[in-house]
Amino acid sequence: MYRKFMHAWERRCHDKDFHSRVVRPFEWGLEHLNGQAHRNSYSPLTVLEKFNQQVLTNSHEFYTPPPARPKDFDFDGFMLRFPSSIETASPTNNTVHARFYPAMRNGKPSDRAVIVMPQWNGKEDAHVAICKGLNYFGISALRLSLPYHDWRMPPELDRADYMVSSNIGRTIQSVQQAVHDIRRCADWLQLQGIKRIGIMGTSVGSCVGFLAWGHDERLEVGVFNHVSSYFGDVVWQGITTQHIRKTLEQYMTQDEARQAWLSISPSAIIPKMKHIRRKAKLIAAKYDLTFPYELSQIVLNDCERHGLPIDKVILPCGHYTSGKAPYKFLDGYHIVSYFVRQWR
């Protein structure tokens, strides 16, 4: 009965902007991989499979941006801007925007901060409440706009469709870009005298945040809100991305989609993380139809199997409904309190 109620509520939330979801044409998008994918005589799918295996072999190189220079950062006291390390075909997307919410601790500017990434297509005010909740406990927050979101959105778009789409290569590039942007945010925080840096993300923000956390030792605490295993499986099975699946299934199977996006999938990276002893909390929702719960269970089991020191929480709601009362208060409590406890 409760499951039926929650699933119906999830679908109503999803359907509110159903007609704004554009079914776009399929593109392999190899040109977005910055010359790192070499076609030769192989089929595009084979090229992508080889590319993904190369990334997984040397993921630190793929997910590490060139060193940032202090003069690259432009901060006006609230808005931080800096050039992305990855230049895309959309000029507006190539400048990173982040908003800084400073906190005081013991009468001085706090020496701890969390980089915050909202969900896919989150509005400008998404996760501002999380930032202010962290501020209340003496933790500063840097709210990062993901690629193609907010001020970074190209003029031809009404939604951040280029972040996750039926263009395979551009989606990979977007995730790589987001990870680079996060790590450059950490560079800036260190320049401000921040000594302890955490990371928090929701949905696709959780995915890119987890990948950044796995490749940057400075990110000492992580909270990943709505987690899943394989990027291709989420796109294929989740209700939020059915308009993308409609295009993909004309060109590939679910297994092929999983392989095409393997290098941006948390479960594919986890075996390389087994040395990590930094703390993280992974949050899943039992009635999630966007990040289906069975996919969340896979990534939770993968973390435990490889010995990652994670805490896990299963919310009694879904993806959209975690942003609705009363569940948003429960979710917010789990997120904020984890950083507070880890940094006592």
Image: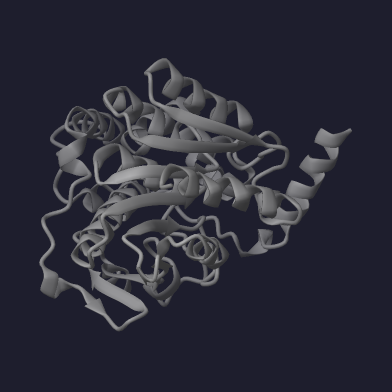
| Residue 337 appears in the figure | yes
Compared across the picture, whether 330 is left or right of 95 comes to right
Question: Residue at point 32% right, 69% down?
Answer: 93
Quadrant for residue 148, please give it.
bottom left
In the rendered image, the residue lying farthest to the bottom is 76
x then y, percent, for residue 268: 35, 27
| Residue 37 appears in the figure | no
Quadrant for residue 323, please give it.
bottom right
In the rendered image, the residue lying farthest to the right is 1
The residue closer to the viewer here, 237 or 269, is 269
Question: Residue at point 18% right, 31% down?
Answer: 54
The residue closer to the viewer here, 239 or 293, is 293
Location of the N terminus (image quadrant): top right
Question: Residue at point 41% right, 43% down?
Answer: 222
How many marks the image carries: the answer is 0
x then y, percent, for residue 335: 54, 48
x then y, percent, for residue 231: 44, 37
The residue closer to the viewer here, 169 or 216, is 216
Compared across the picture, whether 13 is left or right of 230 comes to right
